[in-house]
């Protein structure tokens, strides 16, 4: 035999010997006899397959538990089977025919340990229940003697109400007398004094200035003010409100022409009824008439004389200087 032929025979023998290791696992020798697979959007599935040497199946249910198993022929020609279960509570659990078995000496050691553990557990199964602490005879006698003394002391003493001293009683009487006198005065004022913030006729004064007008100060509709709390407001800035109390009252309204009119009354510190009326608009500014304004050379009656415009150098003009409206 020549050299090339020897090399070819040697290569074929080596390939045949090497391929015998995985000969049984060749796909052509393990055709799939059955195969199935199904799943849904909720994570549930089921699949499996079967060949002449291997079978496999697995299923996952809606409770989150996975169950499955497989079987195969091992290298010794013995059929091995495995069953398993897996869930979030118990973890992975498996039962198989090829799990390691204990040797005889290991099994004997486990049996002796389990017997000793059961013996110790049985001896400590009865737990003593804690008992309440019992008082000594001396403590019991002392407690009874203390309670007897306490009961006798309570029986002989009757609690008495605290009596005011003459000074405290006199101060209380003076305070109550002043309080009753104040209440009587307020009640009399409430019944006899008309507290409507706007009267039909009022003699008052107003400060002269460029923001005043010679026209009527208060319109007739506010003279019919009702002494009750009422209020309304629209989306156009119109409103009317007012209130009446024991010693004061107030009313104010804003009309569609942008003029605000109002007035209030009150009893001052000297017991005198004071009235105030006012008008405010964008053209003439704020004007007021009241019974408690001081009379000065620059003060004139709003209903009797027209107001004279001050000179531009007058400080009053600088304070009440008309403001330009922005459009």
Image (spheres, helix red, strand yellow):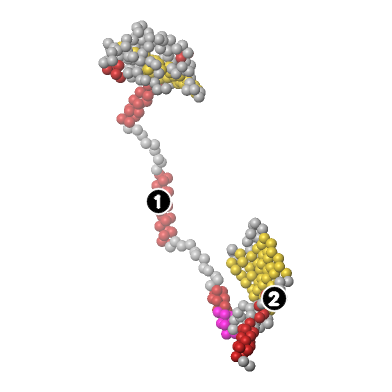
Most extreme residue toward the top is 304
Q: Nearer the viewer, residue 147 or 12?
A: 12
Q: Position of residue 275 (x, y in %)?
A: 38, 15
Is residue 65 rendered magenta in the image?
no
- Write the residue at 40% across / 40% down: 159
Decide whether residue 106 is among the magenta residues.
yes
Location of residue 250 by image quarter: top left
Q: Badge 1: few (under 14), some or many (20 or more) residues near its Cα, within 10 Å? A: few
Task: Tell me what residue is drawn at x 60 percent, y 79 percent.
Answer: 100
Sequence-wise first label, 1 or 2: 2
Q: How far apart are the two marked residues, 1 and 2, measured between alpha carbons? A: 108 Å
Residue 186 appearing in the image: no
Closer-to-camera residue (275/152): 275
Considering depth in this image, is 75 or 126 the residue closer to the camera?
75
Task: Give the vertical position of 68 relative to 162 (above or below).
Answer: below
Q: Position of residue 185 (x, y in %)?
A: 39, 18
The residue that disc 2 covers is 28
Residue 17 x/y as whole percent: 63, 85
Left/right placement of residue 123 relative to residue 150 reads: right
Mark 2 surroundings: few (<14), some (14-19) or many (≥20) residues within 10 A: few
Horizontal side, residue 106 vs residue 251: left or right: right
Q: Residue at x 61, y 88 (%)?
A: 4
Q: What number is the disc on residue 85? A: none
Q: Is residue 219 visible?
A: yes
Q: Which residue is mark 1?
A: 149
Question: CB atoms at circles 1 and 2 under 8 Å apart?
Answer: no
Q: Residue furthest bottom?
A: 1
Stretch in magenta: 104-113
The N terminus sits in image quarter? bottom right
Q: Residue at x 48, y 16 (%)?
A: 226
Secondary structure under tag 2 reads helix
């Amino acid at each position: 035999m020549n050299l090339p032929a020897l090399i070819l025979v040697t290569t074929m023998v080596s390939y045949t010997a090497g391929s015998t290791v995985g000969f049984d696992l060749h796909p052509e020798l393990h055709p799939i006899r059955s195969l199935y697979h199904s799943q849904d959007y909720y994570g549930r599935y089921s699949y499996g397959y079967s060949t002449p040497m291997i079978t496999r199946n697995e299923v996952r249910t809606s409770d989150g538990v996975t169950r499955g198993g497989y079987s195969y022929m091992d290298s010794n020609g013995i059929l091995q089977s495995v069953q398993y279960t897996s869930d979030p509570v118990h973890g992975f659990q498996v039962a198989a025919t090829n799990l390691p078995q204990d040797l005889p000496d290991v099994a004997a050691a486990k049996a002796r340990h389990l017997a000793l553990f059961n013996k110790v557990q049985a001896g400590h199964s009865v737990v003593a229940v804690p008992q309440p602490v019992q008082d000594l005879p001396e403590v019991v006698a002392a407690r009874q003697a203390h309670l007897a003394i306490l009961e006798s002391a309570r029986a002989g003493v009757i609690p008495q109400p605290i009596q005011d001293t003459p000074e405290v009683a006199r101060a209380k009487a003076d305070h109550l007398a002043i309080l009753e006198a104040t209440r009587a005065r307020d009640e009399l004022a409430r019944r006899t004094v008309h507290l409507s913030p706007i009267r039909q006729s009022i003699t008052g004064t107003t400060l002269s200035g460029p923001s005043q007008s010679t026209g009527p100060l208060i319109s007739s509709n506010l003279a019919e003010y009702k002494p009750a709390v009422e209020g309304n407001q629209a989306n156009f800035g119109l409103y009317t409100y007012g209130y009446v109390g024991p010693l004061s009252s107030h009313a104010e309204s804003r009309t569609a022409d942008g003029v605000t009119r109002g007035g209030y009354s009150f009893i001052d510190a000297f017991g005198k009824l004071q009235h105030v009326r006012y008008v405010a608009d964008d053209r003439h500014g704020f004007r007021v008439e009241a019974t408690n304004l001081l009379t000065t050379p620059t003060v004139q009656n709003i209903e009797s004389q027209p107001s004279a415009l001050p000179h531009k150098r007058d400080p009053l003009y600088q304070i009440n200087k008309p403001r330009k409206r922005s459009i």
